[in-house]
Image: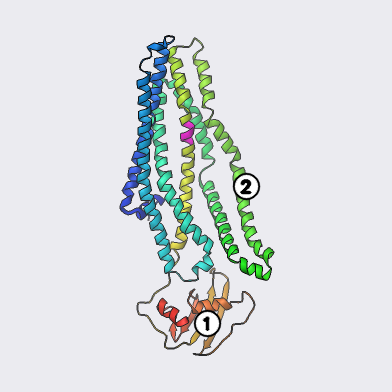
Amino acid sequence: MKKQSDLSRLMGYAGNYRYFTYASWVLSAVSALVALVPFVYIWKILQDVLNAAPNYAQAVNIPHYGWMAVLFAVLSYLIYIAALMCSHLSAFRVATNLRLAVSEHLAVLPLGFAETFGSGKLRKIIHESTGSAETYLAHQLPDQYNAIATPVGLLVLLLAFDWRLGLLSLAPVVLAFLIMATMTGKRMAEKMRQYGNALEAMSNEAVEYVRGIPVVKTFGQSVFSFKKFKAAIDEYEKWVVSYTKDLRLPMMFYTAAVNGVFAFLIAGGLLFTTHGVTPEFLLNLLFYIIITPVISLTLTRMMYMSENKMVVADALARIDSVLETAPMQVQAVPQYPKDSSVTLRDVHFSYDGKTEVIKGVSLEIQPGQTVAFVGPSGGGKSTLANLVCRFFDVQSGSVRVGGADVRDIPKEELMDTIS
């Protein structure tokens, strides 16, 4: 079965609002093409000035060309605003539905899930991961289509006026793409995942540390309690420093290539004017010098396109880590406790599926009987109590309250009985 793409999944959460997303792509692409029209009028202004020189009073079309350039620039801006309005309508709906889906699924998970998963990680997923999906749809995806349409229009303009200068302008583009390839791909995706894990761990430890400050102060354990939090910070620092060093040289060469188009144009200008400078060539050279900065802007946008896709893929993977957690099983025919007795039969339990915390425990507590669980820290006392409340489900064996298996007792009835 073919795996559904991340974008298709997001559109599934958009419902009928997905058509606003599609409209934003079209409008953003149109905006990019319209934004190139003012450069044509700039070329006409330059042509008018050079043809009229030195009697510049004859350049009577300059005001008309100038106002037309302004008109198309404003029109491009308005179309782009319309594209963002459409994309935001869909993006907000997706973010809302993602948060609802995660929250609704949390309601059917064992109550101990938040404890083992980490409240900081949950907060990051519900707030930041869904926020990453919203940002991707609202801003990055429309900009992606804008960045795709711009090179198409640029290619036409670059080759239309002087194909030789056009090809020279494209040379650094090819070089930049080759360098960009070294900064993307599976290796970058893995580093992005590591970054997310380190940031998530640091966020989770920060939340737990702040929550435990009253206990820390009471028992004077500030240094020991900080160890885990500091380890998470150190891990995050290690990743960031390593990632920055890996990209330092490629990014330096990429920046030099993208901004080196002027060097190519100047070299070409010297080569093509060995037999003299014509007004037509001077006009085209000036035009290319003016328009080529758009290339560096477009390439930078395209470079971040692959990173944006990896960010949203990582966000969806983290959301799936919650949505794919099996909910508590609910029996079709519920059972109800006949009294307040508690019985455990050969109970085995593990938080991570590997190391057993409870190993073959059996006990029976009669109604009205008072029992104390005594043992060292980490011995499983709280875990036994949590299993009776069905905050977690046992791996094997059974936990019964009033003769009924806690897995067969409706959640509300079990909570009433336990309380």
Q: Position of residue 314 (x, y in %)?
A: 48, 53
Q: Which residue is mark 1?
A: 346
How many neighbours does mark 2 have within 10 angstroms: few (below 14), some (14-19), or many (20 or more)?
few
| Position of residue 372 in the picture relative to residue 79 (left or right) | right
Q: What residue is drawn where x is 46% and y is 20%?
A: 286
Q: Is residue 408 visible?
A: no
Q: Residue at x 58, y 77 (%)?
A: 380
Compared across the picture, whether 185 is left or right of 36 comes to right
Q: Main secondary structure of the magenta part?
A: helix
Whole-percent x and y of residue 339?
44, 88
Q: Which residues are magenta?
A: 295-299
Mark 1: secondary structure: strand
Q: Quadrant of residue 253?
A: top right
Secondary structure of residue under mark 2: helix
Which residue type does callout 2 highlight? Val
Q: Is residue 27 above or below residue 328?
A: above
Q: Say if the magenta span includes residue 132.
A: no
Q: Nearer the viewer, residue 182 or 73?
A: 73
Per the rendering, the mark at residue 241 is 2
298 in the magenta segment: yes
Q: How many tags in the picture?
A: 2
